[in-house]
Amino acid sequence: MSVENTVNNSQYYRLLLVITGLLFVTTIIIGRLIVFQAVQGEDWAARGLRMQNVSVEAKPERGTIFDRNGAVLAANSQDYQLGVSPSLVTDPAQVATALAPILETDRFAILAKLESDHPYELLSGRISPEVANAIRELDYDGLQLDPLPRRIYPQGDLLCHVLGYTDFQGVGGAGLEGYYQRELAGEAASATQNVSPLAEQINVIAREGADIVLTIDRSVQYLVEEHLERAMRQYQASSGTIIVMNPRTGAIIAMANHPCYEPYRFFEANDRLLVNPAVSQQYEPGSVMKLITMAAALDSGTVTPQSTYYDAGIFEIGGAKIYNADRSGTGTTDMTTLMARSLNVGAAYLATEMGPDNFYSYLLRFGFGRPTGIDLLSEANGTLYLPGDPFWTESSLATNSFGQGIAVTPLQMISAASAIANDGYLMQPYLVQEKYTAEGIFVHEPTVLSRPISAQTARQVTAMAIATIAREIDKAQLNGYTIAGKTGTAQIAENGIYHPTDVIGSFIGWLPGDNPEVIVLVKLDRPKSAPWGSETAAPAFADLAYDLVTLLDIPPDTIRLRADVMAARNQGN
Protein backbone atom coordinates (compact mmCIF):
# COMPACT_ATOMS: atom_id res chain seq x y z
CA MET A 1 0.00 0.00 0.00
CA SER A 2 1.32 3.39 -0.90
CA VAL A 3 1.95 6.16 1.56
CA GLU A 4 -0.79 8.23 -0.06
CA ASN A 5 -3.41 5.51 0.45
CA THR A 6 -2.36 5.13 4.07
CA VAL A 7 -2.86 8.86 4.71
CA ASN A 8 -6.23 8.85 3.00
CA ASN A 9 -7.41 5.89 5.09
CA SER A 10 -6.23 7.58 8.28
CA GLN A 11 -8.05 10.76 7.42
CA TYR A 12 -11.12 8.76 6.53
CA TYR A 13 -11.17 6.97 9.91
CA ARG A 14 -10.59 10.19 11.80
CA LEU A 15 -13.42 11.85 9.89
CA LEU A 16 -15.64 8.86 10.53
CA LEU A 17 -14.81 9.01 14.22
CA VAL A 18 -15.59 12.71 14.37
CA ILE A 19 -18.85 12.23 12.53
CA THR A 20 -19.79 9.31 14.78
CA GLY A 21 -18.99 11.40 17.87
CA LEU A 22 -20.99 14.31 16.54
CA LEU A 23 -23.90 12.02 15.76
CA PHE A 24 -23.68 10.50 19.23
CA VAL A 25 -23.58 13.88 20.94
CA THR A 26 -26.37 15.17 18.71
CA THR A 27 -28.45 12.10 19.55
CA ILE A 28 -27.89 12.69 23.27
CA ILE A 29 -28.78 16.37 22.96
CA ILE A 30 -31.86 15.66 20.90
CA GLY A 31 -32.81 12.88 23.33
CA ARG A 32 -32.38 15.19 26.32
CA LEU A 33 -34.40 17.89 24.57
CA ILE A 34 -37.13 15.38 23.90
CA VAL A 35 -37.04 14.31 27.56
CA PHE A 36 -37.08 17.96 28.74
CA GLN A 37 -39.88 18.93 26.41
CA ALA A 38 -42.04 15.85 26.23
CA VAL A 39 -41.37 13.96 29.45
CA GLN A 40 -40.25 16.62 31.96
CA GLY A 41 -41.74 19.65 30.26
CA GLU A 42 -44.48 20.30 32.78
CA ASP A 43 -42.13 19.89 35.73
CA TRP A 44 -39.55 22.34 34.31
CA ALA A 45 -42.28 24.80 33.40
CA ALA A 46 -43.53 24.69 36.98
CA ARG A 47 -39.99 25.23 38.27
CA GLY A 48 -39.58 28.23 36.05
CA LEU A 49 -42.89 29.61 37.21
CA ARG A 50 -41.85 29.20 40.82
CA MET A 51 -38.65 31.08 40.13
CA GLN A 52 -40.63 33.94 38.59
CA ASN A 53 -43.27 34.05 41.36
CA VAL A 54 -42.64 34.97 44.98
CA SER A 55 -44.97 34.90 47.96
CA VAL A 56 -45.69 38.39 49.31
CA GLU A 57 -47.27 38.91 52.75
CA ALA A 58 -48.50 42.12 54.35
CA LYS A 59 -48.78 42.02 58.14
CA PRO A 60 -51.20 44.37 59.90
CA GLU A 61 -50.46 46.69 62.80
CA ARG A 62 -52.27 45.77 66.02
CA GLY A 63 -54.86 48.33 67.05
CA THR A 64 -54.28 50.86 69.82
CA ILE A 65 -56.34 50.99 73.02
CA PHE A 66 -57.28 54.44 74.34
CA ASP A 67 -59.09 55.66 77.44
CA ARG A 68 -62.21 57.75 76.90
CA ASN A 69 -60.12 60.95 76.74
CA GLY A 70 -57.62 59.66 74.19
CA ALA A 71 -54.80 58.61 76.53
CA VAL A 72 -52.88 55.61 75.10
CA LEU A 73 -53.26 52.48 77.22
CA ALA A 74 -51.85 49.85 74.85
CA ALA A 75 -49.75 50.38 71.71
CA ASN A 76 -47.05 48.77 69.57
CA SER A 77 -43.28 48.84 69.73
CA GLN A 78 -40.53 46.31 69.16
CA ASP A 79 -37.87 44.30 70.91
CA TYR A 80 -34.80 42.97 69.13
CA GLN A 81 -33.07 39.69 68.39
CA LEU A 82 -29.26 39.73 68.43
CA GLY A 83 -27.33 37.49 66.06
CA VAL A 84 -23.77 37.32 64.81
CA SER A 85 -21.82 36.18 61.74
CA PRO A 86 -18.70 34.73 63.44
CA SER A 87 -16.54 34.99 60.31
CA LEU A 88 -16.93 38.80 60.37
CA VAL A 89 -15.85 39.22 64.00
CA THR A 90 -12.19 40.27 64.09
CA ASP A 91 -11.62 40.11 67.86
CA PRO A 92 -14.05 37.62 69.48
CA ALA A 93 -12.55 37.97 72.97
CA GLN A 94 -13.01 41.76 72.98
CA VAL A 95 -16.58 41.54 71.65
CA ALA A 96 -17.53 38.87 74.22
CA THR A 97 -16.12 41.02 77.03
CA ALA A 98 -18.17 44.01 75.86
CA LEU A 99 -21.43 42.07 75.34
CA ALA A 100 -21.45 40.00 78.55
CA PRO A 101 -22.53 42.78 80.98
CA ILE A 102 -25.04 44.23 78.51
CA LEU A 103 -26.73 40.87 77.83
CA GLU A 104 -26.17 39.72 81.43
CA THR A 105 -24.83 36.46 79.99
CA ASP A 106 -21.72 34.43 80.71
CA ARG A 107 -18.75 35.75 78.69
CA PHE A 108 -17.49 32.30 77.77
CA ALA A 109 -20.89 31.27 76.41
CA ILE A 110 -20.85 34.33 74.15
CA LEU A 111 -17.23 33.72 73.13
CA ALA A 112 -18.03 30.13 72.10
CA LYS A 113 -20.65 31.40 69.66
CA LEU A 114 -18.37 34.16 68.34
CA GLU A 115 -15.70 31.55 67.52
CA SER A 116 -18.19 29.11 65.98
CA ASP A 117 -17.71 27.66 62.48
CA HIS A 118 -21.39 28.23 61.67
CA PRO A 119 -22.31 31.11 59.35
CA TYR A 120 -24.81 32.54 61.89
CA GLU A 121 -25.31 32.25 65.66
CA LEU A 122 -28.15 33.60 67.80
CA LEU A 123 -26.73 35.47 70.80
CA SER A 124 -30.00 36.61 72.42
CA GLY A 125 -33.60 35.70 71.72
CA ARG A 126 -35.35 38.94 72.79
CA ILE A 127 -33.83 42.12 74.17
CA SER A 128 -35.31 45.52 74.96
CA PRO A 129 -34.80 48.64 72.82
CA GLU A 130 -32.57 50.06 75.57
CA VAL A 131 -30.27 47.03 75.42
CA ALA A 132 -30.29 47.19 71.61
CA ASN A 133 -29.18 50.83 71.71
CA ALA A 134 -26.32 49.93 74.03
CA ILE A 135 -25.20 47.23 71.57
CA ARG A 136 -25.37 49.67 68.63
CA GLU A 137 -22.99 51.97 70.45
CA LEU A 138 -20.36 49.20 70.48
CA ASP A 139 -20.15 49.35 66.67
CA TYR A 140 -18.59 45.91 66.15
CA ASP A 141 -18.68 44.17 62.77
CA GLY A 142 -20.68 40.96 62.48
CA LEU A 143 -23.43 41.81 64.99
CA GLN A 144 -26.99 41.92 63.67
CA LEU A 145 -30.08 43.34 65.41
CA ASP A 146 -33.43 42.19 63.98
CA PRO A 147 -36.71 43.80 65.18
CA LEU A 148 -39.41 41.68 66.88
CA PRO A 149 -42.95 43.08 67.36
CA ARG A 150 -43.87 43.79 71.00
CA ARG A 151 -46.97 45.17 72.74
CA ILE A 152 -46.31 48.01 75.18
CA TYR A 153 -48.41 49.48 77.99
CA PRO A 154 -47.41 53.11 78.62
CA GLN A 155 -49.35 53.32 81.91
CA GLY A 156 -47.40 50.50 83.57
CA ASP A 157 -49.62 48.20 85.64
CA LEU A 158 -52.61 50.56 85.53
CA LEU A 159 -55.72 48.66 84.39
CA CYS A 160 -53.72 45.42 84.28
CA HIS A 161 -56.70 43.06 84.58
CA VAL A 162 -58.91 45.08 82.25
CA LEU A 163 -56.35 45.41 79.46
CA GLY A 164 -54.91 41.91 79.80
CA TYR A 165 -51.79 41.23 77.76
CA THR A 166 -50.56 40.19 74.31
CA ASP A 167 -48.01 37.38 74.04
CA PHE A 168 -44.93 37.31 71.83
CA GLN A 169 -46.91 35.74 68.98
CA GLY A 170 -49.32 38.69 68.95
CA VAL A 171 -52.21 36.82 70.58
CA GLY A 172 -54.22 38.46 73.37
CA GLY A 173 -54.21 36.28 76.46
CA ALA A 174 -56.64 38.00 78.84
CA GLY A 175 -58.88 41.01 79.35
CA LEU A 176 -59.69 43.28 76.42
CA GLU A 177 -56.62 42.11 74.50
CA GLY A 178 -58.03 38.59 74.50
CA TYR A 179 -61.71 39.42 74.04
CA TYR A 180 -61.07 41.74 71.08
CA GLN A 181 -58.20 39.67 69.62
CA ARG A 182 -59.72 39.44 66.15
CA GLU A 183 -60.55 43.14 65.90
CA LEU A 184 -57.27 44.36 67.41
CA ALA A 185 -55.02 41.98 65.46
CA GLY A 186 -56.50 42.75 62.05
CA GLU A 187 -55.98 40.31 59.20
CA ALA A 188 -52.80 39.59 57.26
CA ALA A 189 -52.93 39.47 53.45
CA SER A 190 -50.79 37.38 51.11
CA ALA A 191 -50.47 36.80 47.38
CA THR A 192 -48.18 35.20 44.79
CA GLN A 193 -46.38 37.94 42.88
CA ASN A 194 -44.69 37.61 39.44
CA VAL A 195 -41.28 39.31 39.58
CA SER A 196 -41.09 39.81 35.84
CA PRO A 197 -41.05 43.54 34.97
CA LEU A 198 -43.52 42.73 32.20
CA ALA A 199 -46.06 41.22 34.59
CA GLU A 200 -48.82 43.22 36.30
CA GLN A 201 -47.92 43.91 39.93
CA ILE A 202 -50.53 43.12 42.60
CA ASN A 203 -51.06 45.33 45.65
CA VAL A 204 -51.18 43.28 48.85
CA ILE A 205 -52.98 45.20 51.60
CA ALA A 206 -53.60 43.84 55.11
CA ARG A 207 -56.69 44.69 57.15
CA GLU A 208 -55.24 46.85 59.92
CA GLY A 209 -56.24 46.20 63.52
CA ALA A 210 -59.09 48.28 64.94
CA ASP A 211 -58.44 51.01 67.49
CA ILE A 212 -60.75 50.90 70.50
CA VAL A 213 -61.79 53.61 72.95
CA LEU A 214 -62.83 52.62 76.47
CA THR A 215 -65.48 53.93 78.82
CA ILE A 216 -62.76 54.19 81.47
CA ASP A 217 -61.09 57.47 82.39
CA ARG A 218 -57.40 56.97 83.16
CA SER A 219 -57.48 59.58 85.94
CA VAL A 220 -60.48 57.96 87.64
CA GLN A 221 -58.87 54.54 87.30
CA TYR A 222 -55.67 55.80 88.90
CA LEU A 223 -57.68 57.30 91.78
CA VAL A 224 -59.60 54.06 92.33
CA GLU A 225 -56.45 51.89 92.28
CA GLU A 226 -54.77 54.25 94.74
CA HIS A 227 -57.75 54.07 97.12
CA LEU A 228 -57.92 50.28 96.83
CA GLU A 229 -54.26 49.85 97.77
CA ARG A 230 -54.68 52.33 100.63
CA ALA A 231 -57.73 50.47 101.97
CA MET A 232 -55.92 47.14 101.80
CA ARG A 233 -53.04 48.54 103.82
CA GLN A 234 -55.32 50.25 106.32
CA TYR A 235 -57.56 47.25 106.91
CA GLN A 236 -54.86 44.62 106.36
CA ALA A 237 -56.71 42.85 103.55
CA SER A 238 -55.09 40.20 101.38
CA SER A 239 -56.74 41.34 98.15
CA GLY A 240 -59.58 43.52 96.95
CA THR A 241 -61.75 44.84 94.14
CA ILE A 242 -63.41 48.17 93.40
CA ILE A 243 -65.79 48.74 90.49
CA VAL A 244 -67.25 52.14 89.54
CA MET A 245 -70.12 52.03 87.07
CA ASN A 246 -72.75 54.26 85.51
CA PRO A 247 -76.02 52.56 86.52
CA ARG A 248 -77.96 54.33 83.76
CA THR A 249 -75.89 52.92 80.90
CA GLY A 250 -73.81 50.03 82.27
CA ALA A 251 -70.57 51.82 81.29
CA ILE A 252 -67.65 50.83 83.50
CA ILE A 253 -65.90 53.99 84.72
CA ALA A 254 -63.19 52.14 86.67
CA MET A 255 -62.38 48.53 87.51
CA ALA A 256 -59.51 47.79 89.87
CA ASN A 257 -58.13 44.67 91.52
CA HIS A 258 -55.15 44.21 93.78
CA PRO A 259 -52.65 42.58 93.69
CA CYS A 260 -51.91 43.40 90.07
CA TYR A 261 -49.20 42.64 87.50
CA GLU A 262 -47.41 44.49 84.70
CA PRO A 263 -48.89 43.48 81.30
CA TYR A 264 -45.60 44.29 79.55
CA ARG A 265 -43.91 41.61 81.67
CA PHE A 266 -46.83 39.17 81.78
CA PHE A 267 -44.45 36.20 81.47
CA GLU A 268 -43.04 36.93 84.92
CA ALA A 269 -46.45 37.03 86.65
CA ASN A 270 -47.98 34.17 88.60
CA ASP A 271 -50.80 32.58 86.58
CA ARG A 272 -53.28 33.43 89.34
CA LEU A 273 -52.59 37.15 88.87
CA LEU A 274 -53.52 37.00 85.19
CA VAL A 275 -57.17 36.30 86.07
CA ASN A 276 -59.48 39.29 86.55
CA PRO A 277 -61.14 38.76 89.98
CA ALA A 278 -63.87 41.30 89.19
CA VAL A 279 -65.37 39.00 86.55
CA SER A 280 -63.76 35.59 87.05
CA GLN A 281 -63.64 34.92 90.80
CA GLN A 282 -66.78 34.01 92.76
CA TYR A 283 -67.57 34.74 96.40
CA GLU A 284 -70.55 34.62 98.73
CA PRO A 285 -71.81 38.23 98.85
CA GLY A 286 -73.32 38.29 102.32
CA SER A 287 -75.83 40.93 103.37
CA VAL A 288 -75.64 43.11 100.25
CA MET A 289 -77.95 40.42 98.85
CA LYS A 290 -80.68 41.78 101.15
CA LEU A 291 -81.11 44.62 98.64
CA ILE A 292 -82.22 42.04 96.09
CA THR A 293 -84.34 40.04 98.54
CA MET A 294 -86.20 43.17 99.67
CA ALA A 295 -86.70 44.31 96.07
CA ALA A 296 -88.17 40.92 95.15
CA ALA A 297 -90.47 40.84 98.19
CA LEU A 298 -91.82 44.34 97.50
CA ASP A 299 -92.17 43.87 93.75
CA SER A 300 -94.00 40.54 94.15
CA GLY A 301 -96.44 42.10 96.60
CA THR A 302 -95.33 39.79 99.40
CA VAL A 303 -94.86 42.82 101.65
CA THR A 304 -95.14 46.60 101.50
CA PRO A 305 -92.75 49.16 102.97
CA GLN A 306 -95.11 49.43 105.96
CA SER A 307 -95.33 45.69 106.61
CA THR A 308 -94.00 44.23 109.87
CA TYR A 309 -92.96 40.80 111.11
CA TYR A 310 -92.00 39.44 114.51
CA ASP A 311 -88.26 38.87 114.88
CA ALA A 312 -87.48 36.42 117.71
CA GLY A 313 -83.79 36.34 116.82
CA ILE A 314 -83.98 32.82 115.41
CA PHE A 315 -85.63 31.27 112.35
CA GLU A 316 -85.83 27.52 111.78
CA ILE A 317 -86.19 25.99 108.32
CA GLY A 318 -85.29 22.59 106.90
CA GLY A 319 -83.54 21.57 110.11
CA ALA A 320 -81.30 24.67 110.07
CA LYS A 321 -81.39 27.57 112.54
CA ILE A 322 -80.94 31.10 111.25
CA TYR A 323 -79.71 33.82 113.63
CA ASN A 324 -79.18 37.53 113.30
CA ALA A 325 -75.53 38.50 113.12
CA ASP A 326 -75.63 40.17 116.55
CA ARG A 327 -77.79 37.36 117.97
CA SER A 328 -80.50 39.90 118.81
CA GLY A 329 -84.27 39.55 118.56
CA THR A 330 -85.91 42.85 117.61
CA GLY A 331 -89.55 41.86 118.16
CA THR A 332 -92.08 43.54 115.88
CA THR A 333 -89.96 44.96 113.08
CA ASP A 334 -90.72 47.00 109.94
CA MET A 335 -89.05 46.64 106.55
CA THR A 336 -86.80 49.68 106.84
CA THR A 337 -85.45 48.47 110.18
CA LEU A 338 -84.88 45.03 108.68
CA MET A 339 -82.65 46.66 106.03
CA ALA A 340 -80.98 49.18 108.33
CA ARG A 341 -80.05 46.58 110.94
CA SER A 342 -79.33 43.92 108.31
CA LEU A 343 -81.41 41.23 109.99
CA ASN A 344 -80.85 37.69 108.71
CA VAL A 345 -84.04 36.46 110.31
CA GLY A 346 -86.01 39.14 108.46
CA ALA A 347 -84.46 38.25 105.10
CA ALA A 348 -85.22 34.56 105.68
CA TYR A 349 -88.79 35.50 106.58
CA LEU A 350 -89.20 37.43 103.30
CA ALA A 351 -87.83 34.58 101.18
CA THR A 352 -90.02 31.91 102.77
CA GLU A 353 -93.08 34.14 102.49
CA MET A 354 -92.36 34.56 98.77
CA GLY A 355 -91.80 30.83 98.27
CA PRO A 356 -88.98 29.25 96.27
CA ASP A 357 -90.54 29.63 92.81
CA ASN A 358 -91.15 33.35 93.26
CA PHE A 359 -87.89 34.08 95.06
CA TYR A 360 -85.62 32.33 92.56
CA SER A 361 -87.46 33.73 89.55
CA TYR A 362 -86.43 37.19 90.78
CA LEU A 363 -82.83 36.15 91.34
CA LEU A 364 -82.70 34.92 87.75
CA ARG A 365 -84.19 38.19 86.51
CA PHE A 366 -81.47 40.08 88.36
CA GLY A 367 -78.88 38.07 86.42
CA PHE A 368 -77.54 35.70 89.06
CA GLY A 369 -76.23 32.34 87.88
CA ARG A 370 -75.18 33.56 84.42
CA PRO A 371 -72.58 35.91 82.91
CA THR A 372 -73.39 39.57 82.42
CA GLY A 373 -71.91 39.46 78.91
CA ILE A 374 -69.27 42.13 79.55
CA ASP A 375 -66.58 42.40 76.87
CA LEU A 376 -63.85 40.65 78.85
CA LEU A 377 -62.44 37.13 78.65
CA SER A 378 -63.22 34.39 81.16
CA GLU A 379 -66.32 35.76 82.85
CA ALA A 380 -67.67 33.30 85.44
CA ASN A 381 -71.31 32.25 85.65
CA GLY A 382 -71.67 32.51 89.39
CA THR A 383 -73.34 29.70 91.34
CA LEU A 384 -77.07 29.61 91.95
CA TYR A 385 -78.63 26.30 92.98
CA LEU A 386 -82.33 26.06 92.23
CA PRO A 387 -84.99 23.78 93.77
CA GLY A 388 -84.45 20.32 92.33
CA ASP A 389 -80.68 20.70 92.02
CA PRO A 390 -78.66 18.09 93.98
CA PHE A 391 -77.02 20.74 96.18
CA TRP A 392 -80.21 22.68 96.95
CA THR A 393 -81.94 22.13 100.28
CA GLU A 394 -84.93 23.71 101.93
CA SER A 395 -82.65 25.81 104.12
CA SER A 396 -81.00 27.24 100.98
CA LEU A 397 -84.06 29.41 100.50
CA ALA A 398 -83.33 31.18 103.78
CA THR A 399 -79.53 31.36 103.54
CA ASN A 400 -79.58 32.59 99.93
CA SER A 401 -81.77 35.51 101.03
CA PHE A 402 -78.87 37.04 102.98
CA GLY A 403 -76.11 36.04 100.55
CA GLN A 404 -74.95 32.70 101.89
CA GLY A 405 -74.85 29.52 99.82
CA ILE A 406 -74.95 31.58 96.62
CA ALA A 407 -71.81 32.72 94.75
CA VAL A 408 -71.48 35.79 92.56
CA THR A 409 -68.76 37.78 90.86
CA PRO A 410 -68.25 41.41 91.94
CA LEU A 411 -69.54 42.50 88.52
CA GLN A 412 -72.73 40.44 88.86
CA MET A 413 -73.39 41.95 92.28
CA ILE A 414 -72.91 45.57 91.26
CA SER A 415 -74.93 45.01 88.08
CA ALA A 416 -77.85 43.58 90.05
CA ALA A 417 -77.75 46.46 92.53
CA SER A 418 -77.56 48.97 89.68
CA ALA A 419 -81.04 47.89 88.56
CA ILE A 420 -82.35 49.24 91.87
CA ALA A 421 -80.50 52.51 91.27
CA ASN A 422 -81.79 52.66 87.68
CA ASP A 423 -85.57 52.50 88.13
CA GLY A 424 -85.57 48.72 87.79
CA TYR A 425 -83.63 48.45 84.51
CA LEU A 426 -80.73 45.99 84.47
CA MET A 427 -78.11 47.24 81.99
CA GLN A 428 -75.40 45.18 80.34
CA PRO A 429 -72.00 46.33 81.62
CA TYR A 430 -69.44 47.24 78.95
CA LEU A 431 -65.93 48.65 78.55
CA VAL A 432 -65.53 49.62 74.88
CA GLN A 433 -67.35 52.77 73.85
CA GLU A 434 -66.05 53.05 70.26
CA LYS A 435 -64.27 50.90 67.66
CA TYR A 436 -62.42 52.48 64.75
CA THR A 437 -62.18 50.02 61.87
CA ALA A 438 -61.59 50.16 58.11
CA GLU A 439 -65.35 49.79 57.69
CA GLY A 440 -66.13 52.79 59.88
CA ILE A 441 -66.68 53.88 63.47
CA PHE A 442 -68.88 51.71 65.68
CA VAL A 443 -70.33 53.31 68.82
CA HIS A 444 -71.72 51.17 71.62
CA GLU A 445 -75.36 51.76 72.52
CA PRO A 446 -76.47 50.93 76.09
CA THR A 447 -78.32 47.62 76.25
CA VAL A 448 -81.14 46.70 78.65
CA LEU A 449 -80.80 43.07 79.76
CA SER A 450 -84.07 42.92 81.71
CA ARG A 451 -86.35 44.84 84.04
CA PRO A 452 -86.58 42.67 87.17
CA ILE A 453 -88.56 45.20 89.23
CA SER A 454 -90.77 48.22 88.65
CA ALA A 455 -89.64 51.84 89.02
CA GLN A 456 -91.84 52.14 92.13
CA THR A 457 -90.16 49.16 93.78
CA ALA A 458 -86.73 50.52 92.87
CA ARG A 459 -87.56 53.86 94.53
CA GLN A 460 -88.90 52.11 97.64
CA VAL A 461 -85.73 50.02 98.06
CA THR A 462 -83.57 53.07 97.37
CA ALA A 463 -85.38 54.95 100.14
CA MET A 464 -84.63 52.07 102.51
CA ALA A 465 -80.99 52.02 101.37
CA ILE A 466 -80.72 55.75 102.05
CA ALA A 467 -82.22 55.27 105.50
CA THR A 468 -79.79 52.41 106.14
CA ILE A 469 -76.82 54.72 105.58
CA ALA A 470 -78.34 57.58 107.56
CA ARG A 471 -79.34 55.43 110.56
CA GLU A 472 -76.74 52.72 110.88
CA ILE A 473 -73.64 53.25 108.71
CA ASP A 474 -72.16 56.62 109.62
CA LYS A 475 -68.79 55.70 108.11
CA ALA A 476 -70.30 55.44 104.62
CA GLN A 477 -71.77 58.93 104.65
CA LEU A 478 -70.40 61.82 102.59
CA ASN A 479 -71.14 65.34 103.74
CA GLY A 480 -73.44 67.15 101.31
CA TYR A 481 -74.51 64.03 99.40
CA THR A 482 -77.34 61.54 99.79
CA ILE A 483 -75.89 58.04 99.78
CA ALA A 484 -77.87 54.84 99.23
CA GLY A 485 -76.14 51.60 100.01
CA LYS A 486 -75.73 48.34 101.87
CA THR A 487 -72.87 46.55 103.58
CA GLY A 488 -72.01 42.89 103.43
CA THR A 489 -69.92 40.64 105.66
CA ALA A 490 -69.55 37.16 104.22
CA GLN A 491 -67.90 34.04 105.54
CA ILE A 492 -65.42 32.32 103.25
CA ALA A 493 -66.17 28.74 102.27
CA GLU A 494 -63.07 26.54 102.08
CA ASN A 495 -63.06 22.77 101.52
CA GLY A 496 -66.76 22.50 102.24
CA ILE A 497 -66.74 24.46 105.53
CA TYR A 498 -66.64 28.12 106.50
CA HIS A 499 -63.37 29.59 107.70
CA PRO A 500 -63.67 30.25 111.45
CA THR A 501 -62.36 33.84 111.33
CA ASP A 502 -61.69 35.10 107.80
CA VAL A 503 -64.42 37.10 106.06
CA ILE A 504 -65.05 39.26 103.00
CA GLY A 505 -66.18 42.80 103.75
CA SER A 506 -68.09 44.61 101.01
CA PHE A 507 -70.18 47.69 100.38
CA ILE A 508 -72.34 48.78 97.45
CA GLY A 509 -73.40 52.41 97.32
CA TRP A 510 -74.78 54.83 94.75
CA LEU A 511 -74.93 58.62 94.67
CA PRO A 512 -76.77 60.88 94.60
CA GLY A 513 -79.15 58.40 96.13
CA ASP A 514 -82.29 59.76 94.44
CA ASN A 515 -80.68 60.39 91.02
CA PRO A 516 -77.44 58.38 90.83
CA GLU A 517 -74.57 59.15 88.50
CA VAL A 518 -72.31 56.39 89.82
CA ILE A 519 -72.60 53.14 91.70
CA VAL A 520 -69.57 51.74 93.51
CA LEU A 521 -68.70 48.29 94.82
CA VAL A 522 -65.88 47.91 97.35
CA LYS A 523 -64.78 44.38 98.25
CA LEU A 524 -61.96 43.64 100.72
CA ASP A 525 -60.82 40.04 101.19
CA ARG A 526 -59.79 38.79 104.63
CA PRO A 527 -59.38 42.15 106.40
CA LYS A 528 -57.67 41.74 109.77
CA SER A 529 -58.45 45.10 111.38
CA ALA A 530 -62.21 44.52 111.84
CA PRO A 531 -64.69 41.71 111.11
CA TRP A 532 -67.53 43.80 109.61
CA GLY A 533 -67.98 45.39 106.19
CA SER A 534 -69.35 48.48 107.94
CA GLU A 535 -65.92 48.93 109.54
CA THR A 536 -63.80 48.30 106.43
CA ALA A 537 -65.49 48.50 103.02
CA ALA A 538 -67.97 51.24 104.00
CA PRO A 539 -65.36 53.81 105.14
CA ALA A 540 -63.20 52.86 102.12
CA PHE A 541 -66.21 53.75 99.96
CA ALA A 542 -66.64 57.11 101.70
CA ASP A 543 -62.95 57.97 101.25
CA LEU A 544 -63.15 57.15 97.56
CA ALA A 545 -66.46 58.97 97.05
CA TYR A 546 -64.98 62.14 98.58
CA ASP A 547 -62.44 62.33 95.74
CA LEU A 548 -64.70 60.81 93.11
CA VAL A 549 -67.38 63.50 93.24
CA THR A 550 -64.71 66.14 92.62
CA LEU A 551 -63.07 64.29 89.74
CA LEU A 552 -66.41 63.47 88.09
CA ASP A 553 -67.85 66.91 88.86
CA ILE A 554 -70.89 65.61 90.75
CA PRO A 555 -72.46 68.57 92.59
CA PRO A 556 -73.68 68.38 96.23
CA ASP A 557 -77.39 67.90 96.85
CA THR A 558 -78.07 71.58 97.63
CA ILE A 559 -76.56 72.81 94.38
CA ARG A 560 -78.07 69.96 92.36
CA LEU A 561 -81.57 70.41 93.77
CA ARG A 562 -81.38 74.20 93.38
CA ALA A 563 -80.47 73.69 89.73
CA ASP A 564 -83.41 71.29 89.32
CA VAL A 565 -85.79 73.86 90.83
CA MET A 566 -84.50 76.61 88.55
CA ALA A 567 -84.81 74.33 85.51
CA ALA A 568 -88.42 73.49 86.47
CA ARG A 569 -89.26 77.19 86.86
CA ASN A 570 -87.75 78.01 83.49
CA GLN A 571 -89.80 75.27 81.86
CA GLY A 572 -92.92 76.62 83.54
CA ASN A 573 -92.23 80.08 82.16
Image (cartoon, grey):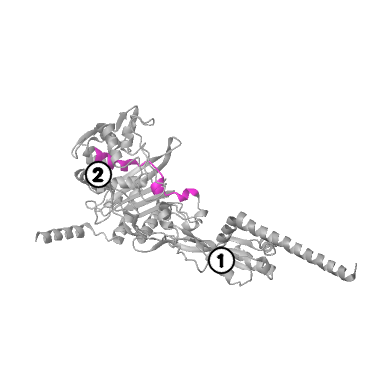
Name the quadrant of the N terminus.
bottom right
Residue 278, label in figure: none
On screen, 374 above or below 406? below
Majority SS type along the magenta span: helix
Q: Which of marks 1 and 2 is nearer the N terminus?
A: 1
Most extreme residue toward the left is 573
Which residue is under mark 2? 451
Q: Position of residue 392 (x, y in %)?
A: 36, 31
Give the camera-side residue of 451 and 567: 451
Q: In which quarter of the image is residue 402?
A: top left
Give the camera-side residue of 431 and 185: 185
The amino acid marked with disc number 1 is Val
Looking at the rendered structure, the secondary structure element under dot 2 is: loop
Q: Where is residue 569 in the image (x, y as percent from the top left)?
A: 11, 60
Q: Where is residue 122 in the image (x, y as percent from the top left)?
A: 62, 61
Residue 532 horizontal side relative to residue 480, left or right: right
On screen, 79 above or below 487? below
Q: Residue at x 55, y 60 (%)?
A: 49
Name the quadrant of the C terminus.
bottom left
Q: How crowded is mark 2: few (under 14 residues within 10 Å), some or many (20 or more)?
A: some
* Magenta-span inclusion, residue 279: yes
Q: In which quarter of the image is residue 434?
A: bottom left
Examine the rendering and report whether any part of residue 288 can be seen: yes
Examine the rendering and report whether any part of residue 529 can be seen: no
Residue 500 horizontal side relative to residue 398, left or right: right
Q: Give the range drawn in magenta.
A: 271-296
On screen, 39 above or below 367? below
Most extreme residue toward the right is 1
Which residue is under mark 1? 131
Q: Where is residue 527 in the image (x, y as percent from the top left)?
A: 41, 47
